[in-house]
Image: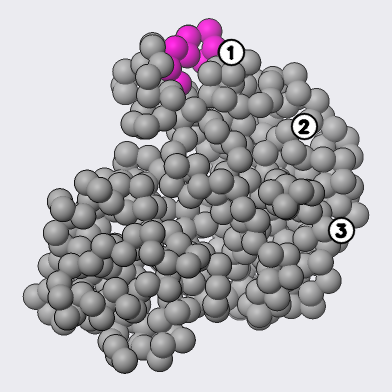
């Protein structure tokens, strides 16, 4: 049996991270050593992203840069994930630095393909595996924060997106297995539910079971809080809103990707909702759950987007006043319907529009955070900032890595513990204060 020391570089989204943790779980099951120091790895796995052109470039550069470790102990580079899943035809002959290529459902082929590679040379094992949802995981986040990937693939056919062609049709993971997995993760301050579209969980089996899943996970003693990401607006149901109101473990936070505010662009994007529906949803959420924090994402510079439509999106931000937002320049992706649309906007103009959106949101966020000055918040400690001699944590309205943080001082603090922090000042995204008690 192959006994090597493995390392991993995982790129892309949190859903990809979970896939990488499953790969590490298979390596651990086989009794092999895992190292965080890639220079010590005999086998280095590059878990790639292919969602956007920039992500594909980053993935390929990671493989090329990793090749230098062959001067040390590195023997094999495994390229896995979205990039080979979608582009293996052109990738395998060109990216000769890779020894083994696996797709998104090929964990079971990792060791057979490696053994074949040691015996015969480069191996293309894309599409030969038996699925990705199986086995234990090796957690790569802070111990108190874990992700639970509840489904893969996508029902939505947004015209700018490659995900359905990479990940396939939406398929929910078995409910009983997800509850079992959540229970196996140990003490968890914050369990984050993720999928391409979490709110459609179960629909591929005939009935939406998203709230049922939330309720069952909420009964687990080892899970203190649950956070929901990637909730599509048209599937935020009355049942889900009621659960947000009444479930003390469910954080009052929803990530609802909109991508645009203007109906003409939304239709071109293949999105199912419209501006007035969105506004009614947010009004209902804030009426039913007054402390709700809403995060969203927008794409700027979609083909044929006019100056007037861009200005309308800025006005929409002012009207709705989201707690957190992310903005991205439209990326023209081959093999998507939007690639062929007329009215492609120059890169410089797209970036200009992104900057304008961020400036507007910074003003909104700064005003929203000002209300916390002089008040106290529950803050979970995530890490120590040695450079600035303070601790870094998050309030309920801040998701890991994508939102702002709370910098706070304390005589002592432990990661994963919750502290009462008095807020003393803020900026556009972050808060600053001092802990008064645990």
> Label 1, on which residue?
264
- What sort of colour scheme is used for the picture? one colour
Residue 427 lies, in percent from the top left, at 56, 42
Q: Quadrant of residue 346?
A: top left
- Name the front one of labels 2 and 1: 1
> Label 2, on which residue?
282
Tell whether 308 sits left or right of 199: left
Mark 3, Cα crowd under 10 Å, few <14 / some 14-19 / many 20+, is some
Residue 353 lies, in percent from the top left, at 44, 21
Foreground pick, 152 / 169: 169
Measured Cα–Cα span from mark 2 to mark 3: 19 Å
* Picture residue at 38% right of the left edge, 11% below the top: 343
Measured along the vertical axis of the image, is residue 329 above or below residue 44? above
Measured Cα–Cα span from mark 2 to mark 1: 20 Å
Q: Quadrant of the C terminus?
A: bottom right
Foreground pick, 161 / 139: 161
Mark 2, Cα crowd under 10 Å, few <14 / some 14-19 / many 20+, is some
> Label 3, on which residue?
247
Mark found first going from the N terminus, 3 or 1: 3
Asked if one can make out residue 146 in the rendered structure from this viewpoint, the answer is: yes
Q: Which residues are magenta?
A: 302-311
Look at the image and say whether residue 437 sits in the magenta stretch.
Answer: no
* Picture residue at 43% right of the left edge, 47% below the top: 166
Foreground pick, 229 / 409: 229
């Amino acid at each position: 049996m192959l006994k090597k020391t493995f390392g991993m570089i995982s790129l892309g989204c949190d859903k990809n991270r979970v896939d990488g943790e499953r790969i590490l779980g298979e390596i651990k099951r086989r009794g092999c050593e895992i190292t965080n120091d890639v220079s010590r790895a005999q086998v280095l796995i590059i878990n790639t992203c292919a969602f956007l052109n920039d992500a594909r470039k980053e993935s390929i550069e990671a493989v090329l840069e990793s090749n230098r470790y062959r001067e040390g102990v590195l023997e094999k580079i495994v390229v896995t994930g979205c990039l080979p899943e979608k582009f293996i035809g052109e990738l395998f002959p060109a990216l000769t630095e890779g020894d083994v290529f696996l797709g998104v459902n090929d964990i079971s082929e990792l060791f057979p393909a490696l053994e074949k590679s040691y015996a015969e040379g480069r191996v293309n094992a894309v599409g030969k595996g038996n699925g990705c949802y199986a086995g234990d995981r090796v957690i790569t986040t802070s111990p108190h924060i874990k992700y639970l990937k509840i489904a893969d693939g996508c029902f939505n056919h947004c015209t700018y997106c490659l995900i359905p062609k990479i990940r396939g049709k939406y398929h929910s993971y078995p409910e009983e297995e997800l509850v079992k997995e959540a229970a196996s993760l140990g003490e968890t301050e914050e369990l984050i539910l993720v999928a391409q579209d979490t709110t459609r969980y179960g629909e591929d089996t005939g009935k939406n079971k998203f709230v049922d899943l939330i309720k069952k996970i909420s009964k687990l003693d080892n899970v203190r809080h649950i956070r929901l990401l990637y909730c599509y607006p048209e599937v935020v149901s009355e049942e889900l809103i009621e659960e947000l109101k009444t479930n003390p473990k469910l954080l009052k936070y929803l990530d609802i990707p909109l991508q645009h505010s203007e109906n003409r662009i939304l239709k071109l994007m293949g999105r199912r909702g419209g501006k007035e529906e969105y506004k009614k949803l947010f009004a209902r959420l804030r009426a039913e759950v007054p402390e709700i924090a809403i995060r969203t994402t927008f794409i700027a510079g979609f083909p044929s987007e006019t100056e007037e439509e861009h200005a309308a999106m800025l006005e929409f931000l002012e009207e709705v006043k989201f707690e957190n937002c992310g903005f991205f320049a439209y990326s023209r992706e081959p093999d998507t319907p939007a690639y062929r649309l007329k009215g492609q906007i120059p890169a410089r103009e797209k970036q200009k529009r992104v900057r304008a959106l961020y400036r507007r949101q910074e003003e909104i966020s700064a005003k929203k955070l000002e209300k916390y000055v002089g008040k106290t918040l529950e803050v979970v400690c995530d890490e120590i900032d040695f450079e600035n001699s303070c601790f870094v944590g998050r309030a309920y309205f801040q998701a890991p890595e994508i939102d702002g943080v709370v910098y706070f001082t304390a005589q002592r603090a432990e990661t994963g513990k919750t502290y009462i922090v008095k807020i003393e000042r803020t900026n556009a995204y972050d808060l600053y204060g001092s802990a008064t008690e645990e």
